[in-house]
Amino acid sequence: MGIPVFILAGLLVHCVFLVSIFEIYFSSPLVHGMTPQQTPLPPPAKRLVLFVADGLRADSLYELNSNNTPQAPYLRGILENNGSWGISHTRVPTESRPGHVALIAGFYEDVSAVAKGWKENPVEFDSVFNESKYTWSWGSPDILPMFAKGNSHLESDNIFSYFSREYKENIKKVDEGVKEIASMIDNFYGNDGKTAFILTSDHGMTDWGSHGAGHPSETLTPLIVWGAGVNYPQKVTSQFFEDNFLKEWKLENLKRLDVNQGTLPLEYLNNSAHFKAESMFTNAVQILEQFKVKMSHKKETTLSFLFTPFKPLSDSEQINFLKKARLYIQQQKYDEAVSLCKTLINLALEGLSYYHTYDRLFLGLSIAVSFVGWTAYVILVIIKTHTNLTKTIQESTVLFYSFAFVGMIIAFFLLIQTCPWTYYVYCLLPVPVWYAVVRELPLIQDLAANLLSLRIGQSMGFLLVCALGIEILVFSFFYRSTLTIGLLVFAGWPVITQLWVQAKTTALIWTLLCVLLAIFPLMPVVGREPNIPLVIATGLLTLLISCFSLTSLCNSKNKYRNNEDLKVHFYQMLSVALSTYVVSSTHDSLKNKQGLPVLNQIISWMTLVSSSVLPLLSPTFLFQRLFSILLSLMSIYLLLSTGYEALFPLVLSGLMFVWISMEQEALQHYGLSLKPKLAVFNFSYATDITQFRQLHLDDVRRAFFFVFFIVTAFFGTGNIASVNSFDPASVYCFLTVFSPFMMGGLLVLKVVIPFVLVSCAFEAVQVTTQLSSKRYSKCCFCISKHFFFLVKDYGSWLDIGTSISHYVLVMSLTIFMMLMNGLAQLLTTQRLELPRRTKHHFT
């Protein structure tokens, strides 16, 4: 297989693996075609008024002011004298659309909406709106249209803090508005006592003004209910909750009724036991109808001898449950009826999950077999390309027709079950992948013979270290502190390999920088603790290092060739100085409520543009070009920083500079080639020299270092899997008006900058160690299969979103590193020549 065909095949296989999780884990669980159910008894209310306060936290509403007066006097009076209250527990993602879906439609956000960015549901669903005779709604135009199929919306919350004056003033406005509307409606209907009122929130908000993740300040929302059919306040002497909110809010003597969306809260209802039992029975029948539709669909699309029903709810069991519950109601045993209906609901929900995931094991095994096959094939291609092992392949007609016959059997099996076309892709993919592996049988035999010739202990030790390294990378996606452990191990690498003997100074600097970088994964996620003085100090430190570097280069043999080179360096220093000033000035202006100065905004955008070009004007000598890239990226990164993360690329790049030197020492240590003179090494003279050297075991270690540094670049200061890890203040030097696409682009740029630094350093490593980086990216694929089996479609949305992000990140990393490799080559090898002014001499 040629290189272009191999790359194309790799892209296709990666795309299949990437898309597969959305088919296997995130297809919509909603079903259609059920018979509508109604409670036979008349409802206690003729109308419902629902107030949803966008972004209102429970503690912000319930707590008292410093003078012991309520934040919302009207609503406080309601919960003390007229209605019931509690905390509603939302789920992640704590955004407006999922919150409103849970409130109005009665189910948690459809998991397949992950592909829609939580903005539009991919399938139609019933809600209180379309099941009511009349519905009127007033509110923000970016919220209401989302319940109409085909309309999308953009989140446009004002960014206010738990503690800002604006936030507390908004609570007072909400209180006054609710009071006015409630009075107006009661008067309009002649105070007939047939109106029920509910006040709640779609989500909360963090102390720094963001939402989307699973912090209690985002998931705990207020719930106050009053009016027709609602219980009055219930006095209690004591009640137990794990939190201390009751004492803080001075509500210890009023019964707190917490709810989770989707569960009928009977304690809120002021009605007869008969009505409550009938309501629960109707609820159970509704869910049982969904179960029946789901079971019928799966039974129709599965061969009879392969179909395995959900035994706890067989046809006879369903009839028994319904008959027994109805009999309890007729005998006025309402508590027993409610208990039985709850059991039926739980079983029906389990059955729905059972049939929804019916094909998951089958499809998951197909993808897993493809994973293993493709990984094996990639390893074989690398070994075949970079070693002296056999290059022949096994050509056999019998082999080809055998795999073709297996493919036909699989296709026929899927056809008679009327499976979706995507099932053919996932189930047939292992056939060509493993055919390609088996064709390399001569290479496999040759490789096995060579491995047997090695000492078993040495081989097993090497495999153990490789497996341990991969697991460390996997754990780092869940526990950032794992990166600290890895970096501390890296710090001892020169001692373990005896490299410190031949390069004591370089080894010492390597150790110190590894220890320094290991501190960052132990720090809080970026955005929690802003520290602008530290950002300013980082800018000044960058300028100091730049001055020292300029002095060293001017005094070295590799001096700047002309004034233009010196000008580029000075321009970059000026850019860093301006960025430092803009950060200080902008945050002072915002702190004084004066907004973003126009001049600062212009400087920020000009810095972003100019810093993309300035490195290409600098000399292509190794250290000069790399330092020029660092200065340009630092000037941008400072503008996007709010705290300690400003130091991260500076320390990371320092380690990268030392890594380049350490790899030269390792190269000489193992006798692979002569040590090049890095001081005069020129990127522009570097060509593709992969043919000069074959693979060595130490190259596996080098590849692991690269991947580890890439992961550290992503997770060193936060978790990219959670959008909530980023503070909106990071983009305040560029804009303060809410613009999701622009803000998102700037935040992605902030994440990519450390990535670029590592890629450029590795470009230097691979050209100076005489081995291409194109094969190193395959190391990422070995850890990607771990995350396929760690994808979740249950638990909190934070867990689900994180598992998706991990898998997508790792699957995309291989492709992304290829792009970064191209960008690194552009930044290190290309140079733009400015037109020089011609000197005229007059006589």
Image (cartoon, helix red, strand yellow):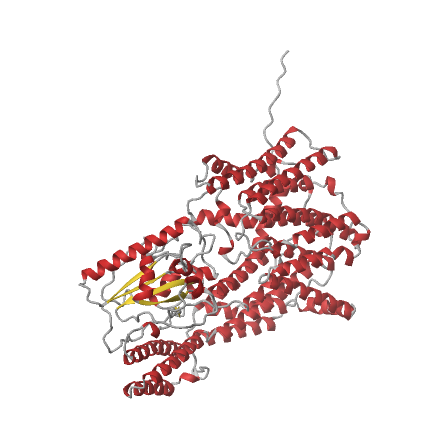
Quarter-of-image position of residue 296: bottom left
Name the residue at 58% across, 56% down.
Answer: 715
Q: Residue furthest top?
A: 843
The quadrant of the picture occupied by the N terminus is bottom right
Name the residue at 65% across, 68% down.
Answer: 394
Q: Relative to 805, is 406 above or below?
A: below
Q: Relative to 666, is 403 above or below?
A: below
Looking at the image, residue 725 sits to the left or right of residue 418; the answer is: right
Looking at the image, residue 32 sits to the left or right of residue 821; the answer is: left
Q: Position of residue 345 (x, y in %)?
A: 38, 78
Q: Residue furthest front?
A: 67
Q: Position of residue 601 (x, y in %)?
A: 47, 38
| Along the viewing direction, whichever of 643 and 136 lies nearer the viewer | 643
Let me know if residue 565 appears in the view: yes
Name the residue at 74% across, 33% down.
Answer: 555
| Along the viewing direction, whichever of 251 and 518 lies nearer the viewer | 251
| Along the viewing direction, whichever of 288 and 644 lies nearer the viewer | 644
Q: How many marks?
A: 0
Q: Position of residue 307 (x, y in %)?
A: 44, 82
Q: Position of residue 689 (x, y in %)?
A: 70, 49
Let me know if residue 91 appears in the view: no
Q: Residue furthest right?
A: 501
The quadrant of the picture occupied by the C terminus is top right
